[in-house]
Amino acid sequence: MRIIAGILSCVLMFSFALPSFVDATVELNDDTIVEEYVPEEDSGIDLSNVDVSNFDFEKFENEYDFLITDPVFLQLEGELSKPRVEYVIEKNPLTGELIVKQEILPTLVIGALRVLTSKAGRTAADKGWKIARPYVQKALDAPNKYILEGPYKTRIIQVRSKVTKKVLFRLDYGPVKNKGPYLHYHVPPNLNDHHIIW
């Protein structure tokens, strides 16, 4: 009788412990996406809080006419200044139920993209926009497939897949290996590589 009770107690203990092992395995599999993470370098530069109060918009329009006349840039500005909501699905650790959370993403003040562009200078902005434009155009043309994100820390623009949440393109203005700041971008497969523009 003791042997049967011992076996039953072991089976009962495994039945309680097994679901946590399964959950741990699933969480580990979800964590494999971490390789797509592009680390932010602590640079002291924060592009997410841009002051546009003393910015000379007329001078910008004269100096950066290639952007002002580009409909994709104007559409990008309009898109980044709209309030956006993103839905995140998380698993409740106690019940295992899926929970849909609503996150209101910060909007970009109209004109802030122009201020950030002017920090890099005209030549850098011209080169950077030539590289960024196809990615931005693709995201603007298919908003149901791509997430377009504005400034945050050293990031100016980022395009991600809505399905996988993976970064497809990111334009930064900040230090690279503790030198700079440089205008640079990141693309898959290795998002840790800094492709310096200027």
Image (cartoon, helix red, strand yellow):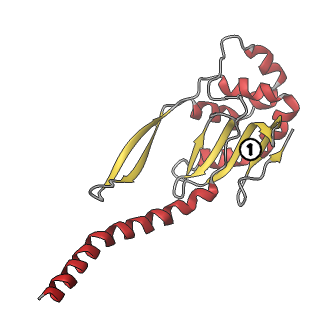
Three-letter residue code for mark 1? Ala
Residue drawn 51% across the image and 57% down it: 163
Does dot 1 land on a helix, a strand or a loop?
helix
Q: In what quadrant of the picture does the N terminus appear?
A: bottom left
Relative to the observer, which residue lies in front, 42 or 198? 42
**Residue 153, x across and y down, in percent:** 65, 33
Task: Using the image, determine if residue 190 lies above or below residue 102.
Answer: below
Left-right relation of 147 to 191: left
**Residue 38, x across and y down, in percent:** 66, 49
**Residue 191, x across and y down, in percent:** 71, 54
Residue furthest left in the image: 1
Residue drawn 42% across the image and 48% down it: 88
**Residue 175, x across and y down, in percent:** 79, 37
Left-right relation of 157 to 66: left
Left-right relation of 64 to 19: right
Q: Which residue is mark 1?
A: 132
Task: Using the image, determine if residue 146 lies above or below residue 2.
Answer: above
How many marks do you count on the picture? 1
Q: Residues within 10 Å of mark 1 (few under 14, many from 20)?
A: some
Relative to the observer, which residue lies in front, 15 or 163? 15
Instruction: Name which quarter of the figure residue 55 lies in.
Output: top right
